[in-house]
Image: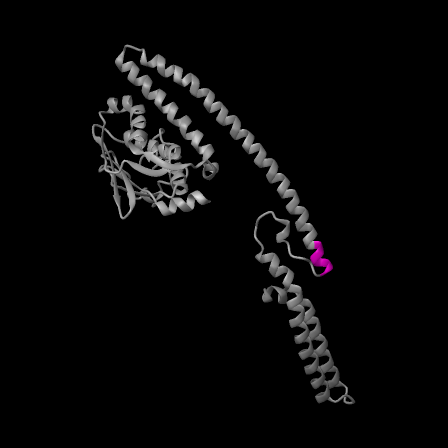
Amino acid sequence: MILHYLKERLSWILFILCLQMFLIIFAFIDPSIALSSMIYYVFLTLLSFLVFLFFRYQKESFFFKQLKNRNTELDFTSIPDPGSPFEELVADNLTEEIDRLRKEASGIQQQSEQEMDELLAWIHEVKTPLSTIRLIIDRIEDQKLRQQLTYEWLRVHLLLDQKLHQKRIHFLENDLYIEQVDLRSLLIPEIKSLQSWCMEKGIGFDMELNVPHVLSDAKWLAFILRQLLTNAVKYSENSDIKIIAYEKHGRTHVILQDEGRGIEAQDLPRIFEKGFTSTVHHHDGRATGMGLYLVKNAATALKIEIDVRSASRRGTSVTLTFPDRNTFTDLRSM
């Protein structure tokens, strides 16, 4: 801050120094003025000026130090009290700008909430005819045609579900309800929804749930498992997907392991980035790059740690590590 202050007052400092140099030159030219006396006078003047500069720095920089250290929120109270007319001008300008930005932000938030409500309402309306279409598909006698239509129906259903949770993710912390969740009751419906797709690809499931329950939010945990199971089925063929739940050091671990195409080593650090698909299979039009991004956000809110291990053509293993009870006690009190 002191460097900024000196730069701001540089013209004044140079002016004072030039005046002192002028006095010394004047004394040197005029023999009637003692040069030693003038140099002593200049020394005292410069010393007084340095003391004056120090105290003025303390006074004039106080307002701007507070301004620099204030929080970036649109809060009027974070603006320091001005101590001079110029500082009052700056404070008034900031207050007007903050007021304008707050009004704009409020309008944008209202518009965003209205658009989200409209989209969510539209998604729920679309789910009704989708349910009807599913009933019609189930009545088709041609097995091959029924499987193809079921697969396409499932893709639409999963995309709508992903979009629904994508819009809700911003309000996730207000939507959590932590309870004892039965893993089997949560997993079975998700597996059944993928049944026709799994039959077409020759995929089975092997569950070993040594821990039957976990503390979590049932709705968002179901979404996380749905996305992970969908990815496992999407990139697997003629193999089994293993689901293992066990407890270690007081924490529950759930592993989803497939024998699919796996993830390339250069892609592994980026799989949770928004919009990232793949560097090797970039042509894959089925991937949106949103599924794992939403999974990571939901898991973070639920205090779930995610560890992904994979190798190309060797399958993928995803481990969900749930927090202990004390962590959820803190989460409930928030």
Q: What residue is at 66 percent from the left and 66 percent from the top?
A: 59
In front of the other: 269 or 9: 269
Type of secondary structure dominating the magenta stretch: helix
> Is residue 36 toward the left or the right of residue 296 in the image?
right
Looking at the picture, how far across and down is residue 74, in whole percent? 60, 47
Q: What residue is at 68 percent from the left and 67 percent from the top?
A: 11
**Where 218 falls versus 100 (above or below)?**
above
**Where 317 falls versus 83 (above or below)?**
above
> Is residue 287 toward the left or the right of residue 3 in the image?
left
In the rendered image, residue 277 lying in the magenta stretch gets the answer: no
Q: What residue is at 41 percent from the left and 41 percent from the top?
A: 301
Looking at the picture, how far across and down is residue 320, in whole percent? 31, 41
Looking at the picture, how far across and down is residue 318, in whole percent? 29, 39
Residue 126: quadrant of the picture: top left
Residue 269: quadrant of the picture: top left
Q: In the rendered image, is residue 276 in sight?
A: no
